[in-house]
Image (cartoon, rainbow, N blue to C red):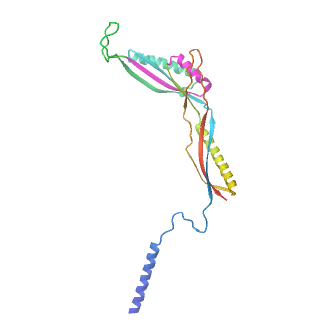
């Protein structure tokens, strides 16, 4: 091979190497960059709107219980069981289904003698800290699906021997439907808002580019804090109303 040919070949290889390095080192296009830089990005408008649905609760939760103190565990348990069975029967007589009566608490605790050295009447005092009895506490949650009888359930339970009425709370039986209704209303409000803004700006509203929602605010069961009824009066129950709120954010294209 002549010296001239070797020189030309070496130069060609050097040029190929430089070209290869140029291809490897050239930066790639940024992810998501438009393929045609001459086209401007889409014009959009972003709006948020909230809506709420007002509901009248249709379910009441009533907490009922019995506290019995007796000298022995067996006696305390027997008394609590007797009263609780009567309370459950009274609720069922008012139309409450068996599946809607749920035990929430069963608690047994000892009762101790006072730390004394003598008794006021002159009799001997029990040994300090000795167990002198037992207290049995049982609680049930009663779900009342007919609010017209909620007060009657309380009255019947106390007449049957319930010593504890731990309040009444109200809720709705189908909160998911209420949430959906609120979301649909919020979407309609967001679209109306976007249309009004687009018209004021002299542009036309196009397609929906994206849509998101905030967690729907479904109210928890809330307590009824009515005044204690007179002994010979029926227990009043007023469920009031509740609001289910939804918020959506929508991005529209402007035509």
Residue 32 left/right relative to 4: right
Residue at the image position 42 percent from the left and 87 percent from the top: 9
Residue 160 within the magenta-colored segment of the rendering = yes
| Front one among 144 and 182 | 182
| Front one among 185 and 15 | 185
- Which image quarter: residue 99? top right
Residue 152 left/right relative to 25: right
Q: Quick check: can you spot residue 1? A: no
Locate the N terminus by quadrant: bottom left
**Where's residue 8, x and y in %?**
42, 88
Looking at the image, residue 69 lies above or below residue 167: above
Residue 169 left/right relative to 5: right
Looking at the image, residue 98 lies above or below residue 220: above
Looking at the image, residue 46 lies above or below residue 113: below
**Where's residue 127, x and y in %?**
30, 14
Residue at the image position 39 percent from the left and 18 percent from the top: 134
Residue at the image position 39 percent from the left and 22 percent from the top: 109
- Which image quarter: residue 208? bottom right
* Stretch in magenta: 133-162
| Front one among 16 and 248 | 248
Looking at the image, residue 101 lies above or below residue 20: above
**Where's residue 247, x and y in %?**
59, 45
Residue 71 within the magenta-colored segment of the rendering = no
Locate the C terminus by quadrant: bottom right
Residue at the image position 58 percent from the left and 30 percent from the top: 59
């Amino acid at each position: 091979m002549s010296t001239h040919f070797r020189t030309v070949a070496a130069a060609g290889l050097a040029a190929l190497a430089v070209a290869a390095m140029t291809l490897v080192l050239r930066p790639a296009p940024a992810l998501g960059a438009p393929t045609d830089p001459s086209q401007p990005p889409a014009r959009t408008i972003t709006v948020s709107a909230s809506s709420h649905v007002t509901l009248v609760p249709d379910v009441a939760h009533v907490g009922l219980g019995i506290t019995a103190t007796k000298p022995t565990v067996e006696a305390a348990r027997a008394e609590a069981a007797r009263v609780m069975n009567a309370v459950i029967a009274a609720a069922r007589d008012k139309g409450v289904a068996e599946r809607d009566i749920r035990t929430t608490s069963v608690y047994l605790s000892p009762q101790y003698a006072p730390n004394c050295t003598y008794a006021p009447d002159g009799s001997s005092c029990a040994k300090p800290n000795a167990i002198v009895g037992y207290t049995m506490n049982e609680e049930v949650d009663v779900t009342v699906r007919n609010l017209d009888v909620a007060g009657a359930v309380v009255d019947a339970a106390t007449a049957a021997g319930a010593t504890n009425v731990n309040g009444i709370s109200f809720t709705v039986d189908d909160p998911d439907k209420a949430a959906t209704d609120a979301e649909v209303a919020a979407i309609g409000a967001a679209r109306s808002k976007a249309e009004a803004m687009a018209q004021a700006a002299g542009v036309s509203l196009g397609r929906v580019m994206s849509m998101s929602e905030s967690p729907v605010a479904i109210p928890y069961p809330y307590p009824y804090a009515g005044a204690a009824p007179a002994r010979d009066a029926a227990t009043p129950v007023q469920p009031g109303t509740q609001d289910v709120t939804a918020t959506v954010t929508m991005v529209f294209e402007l035509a």
